[in-house]
Image (cartoon, rainbow, N blue to C red):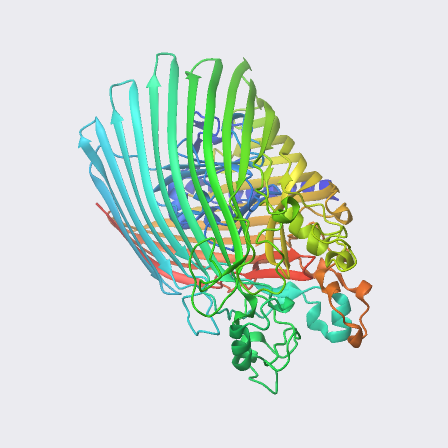
Amino acid sequence: MFRKSVISIAMVGVAATWAASLSAPVQAQTATLEEVVVTARKRSESLQDVPIAVAAFTEATIRNAGIDRPQDFISLTPNVTIVDSANVGDTQVSIRGIVSTRDAESTFAYIVDGVLATNPNAFNEELVDVAQIEILKGPQGALYGRNAVAGAILVTTKEPTNELEGKLKISVGSQNREKAQFVVSGPLVKDKLLGRLTLSHSKTDGFFSNAFTGESDSVDYLDDRTVRGRLIWNANEDLRFDLKAGYSEVKGGAINFNADFAIPEFAANLGPAFFADVNNHDFIFAFNVPGENKQETKEISLKMDWDLGGMNLTAILAHSDLEEYLLSDGTSASFYGYEITDQCLQDRATLNNAPWGADRTDLFGEFFAPFGVFPPDTNFAGVYGPYTPTACDGYQYQERNQKDTSFELRLASSQDQSLRWVAGVYGADIEREVIVTYGQDKGEGFLRQSFVPSAGPNPTDLMFSDMYDTGVLSAFGQLEFDITESLELSLAARYDQEDRDVTNQVPAVAPQGENLNSGQWINPAFNVTGGEPIEKRSKTFSQFQPKVSLMWKATDTVNLYVDYGVGFRSGGFNSVGSEALLDFWFGDTCPYFLDSCVNGPGVPVDAGLNVKDEYDKEVTTSFEIGTKMEFLDSRLRVNAAIFQTQVDDSQFFEFFAGPFGLLRAVTTVDEVEINGFELDFNALLMDNWSLYGGVGLLESEIKKNENRPLSEGNNVPQAPEQTFNLGTQVDFPIGDRMNLMARLDYQYIGDMWFHTLQGEATPNVWRLFDFTAFGIVQEDIMSDMSKAKRDAYGTIDGRVSLRGDTWSVTAWGRNLTDENYLQEVIPAPEFGGSFIHPTGGRSYGVDFELFF
């Protein structure tokens, strides 16, 4: 079935673009497609001559398409998708079905001006003053190093100029959008010292409002301030230094999720809302804890390029510093941990949705559909749901702080010879602090800190706090050889070694708040040690990553290639105490601190989880056959590839919620197979009219999964079977001094699973409760995630620009049809449902640009 789809789509794509091009009047065709020069192999060469599947966006495309953030260019790339939900830097990018993992390393190398970013939040920054973007698909570890199991994304910013120039851009739009950018570039010392300064500020109130507070700018708001500077010193004709520095501060909403249940037995006895399709959810944001995320990032790098005569030496030294926190409402109200605290009782008196009480259906929805909150005279009853306006659910606080320093030393031959080579070494020292805490909401405000004692306004009841130290050392090389004038062989290899340590930072104290579900210690790992210090853990992960490519120039305009490559993503550690916590609440083993398992809460649940405090490395092996073609005197460009990818120990993010609050963990799926096809085309129908697009097909399967055996045979999460985009652009002069550009883009993403479990019955934490009065047998309470698949969707974006020599005005709109679709679904089978995040609707605005 997959092979037939590949053949039919390929034939239709090529035939359609060919026919469209032939339909244009021959006598009017004088222009050709712009040649795209890329640096995918660390040297400049034509896109059509690179034996790698590359989606490239030139400066003209970036401007015409209005690419401001990563999701803008990802929407134009087949077989690449993005999820941007929980907080500003929390993006998950899927390239050919291999997806980034929360709380683990990325799956792709992110390179800015030749510098590998080690900060996981760096990818979701504003794209300001960018000259080109390249998406390399397939394992790229041989040249681009750690974590490039799915590919690499290369961003090239604009260099300082030898003449004074600048730009001022002002944007206004819906949702109170405001944006201002200022760029100035020029010589400090003519021909010798050149500088460039970029300032950017953007903000929006977002699409959603808080039904509890009535505020329209407290849910998905965003405020981004960025300043970047760059100096290039041409020491002499052979030696150049490139110094870059940047600072950004981002504030935005956080954890804007609702929840849907997935328990068929509840639905049969209590109402259909307890087994709901996530795509039909009516969102209500009504939290009393301000969802907020703040990030502060500092970056600096120095790059040296030295022409040694026949060889080029490149040296890079980079440092970044990220400080981030997020604060939001909690999830555990339905488990009654804070049920009888003063603030919970007070809130329930005025905020319940019981028909005989306050009847606040505006905050919870209709009574028991599915949430039911009772007044204070009825305790330990009802279904509250997460992220509520009451203090009964507590709060959560997280920090992600990272400091890293990296270096790279690379020696390359000149590129005008039949034998070309690159060799180098890379090293990095990364210090990452990860904190997740859960505590009591006393209605007295919140301290933005990891540990709050019992006397504080928001005392801590559950705490994970770890310091991760990673040392990276790598050696790599590539050899390209012209076997004949039309045949090129490329051999590359890399060896990576990562030494990882994790140190627990949680104090050995009792929970500080009044959560009735808390254990003896603030971190469950102390149940194992009896309160003694938790030892530091260490582990080394290493991998050899070869890559072989063969490129055949069949004709002057048709190239064929085959490619084999291996990628590597280091293993790591979950927060200390994760395994102990899940064993206690969801496992059938005897809790560490009880003499008997008779009353152990995990016994009736018996979820069969195998989550550990550490997880294995991920290794990707890929084989690809591709072609790059141009026809009709370079007026039609068609590139296509078919590939097969095997992934061993694919790292997967799991989310757990229960009486304890919440827990984030990384597990592994033992064996995954992904087969795929993609095609993209660009056709110049007339000199000023182009048609472009692409299609991606994926067929994925979980072959083996010891953590979730029931998932074997299911689709790989975040690997939609179909993605495609189609667009057109016209650009023609108006008089002698102006141009009019109009562009329309359509994107389609097929339906998509977010979890390995996709309908298999699994036990959940609601087995801890007695529902016999409702005719529900404990053993029949199971989760079914079959309704947790995100529906397919399509969006349309449009832009119209009027441009003069020194100015432009652009009217734009995104999601013009106001398509309603989910951004993310986070199934939590042991909770009995999913946490879901919507996507904003239609937006529009006007951009003004002035050049000097």
Q: Is residue 347 left or right of residue 849?
A: right
Above-or-below relation of 462 to 620: below
Q: Position of residue 421 (x, y in %)?
A: 48, 16
**Residue at x 54% of width, y 47% of height:** 92
- Quarter of the rendering occupied by the N terminus: top right
Residue 337 to residue 130: above or below: below
Left or right: 228 in relation to 371 = left
Which corner quadrant of the image does residue 542 belong to?
top right
**Residue 721 seen in render:** no
Q: Quadrant of the C terminus?
A: top left
Above or below, comparing residue 536 to residue 592 in the picture: above
Residue 669 coordinates in the image, percent (x, y) = 69, 41
Q: Nearer the viewer, residue 753 or 834?
A: 834
Where residue 848 appears, x then y in whole percent? Answer: 29, 55
**Residue 384 seen anywhere in this rendered image of the structure:** yes
Residue at x-position 33% and y-position 44%: 247
Residue 144's spot in the image, x, y percent?
A: 50, 29
Give the mark count: 0
> Residue most toward the left?
189
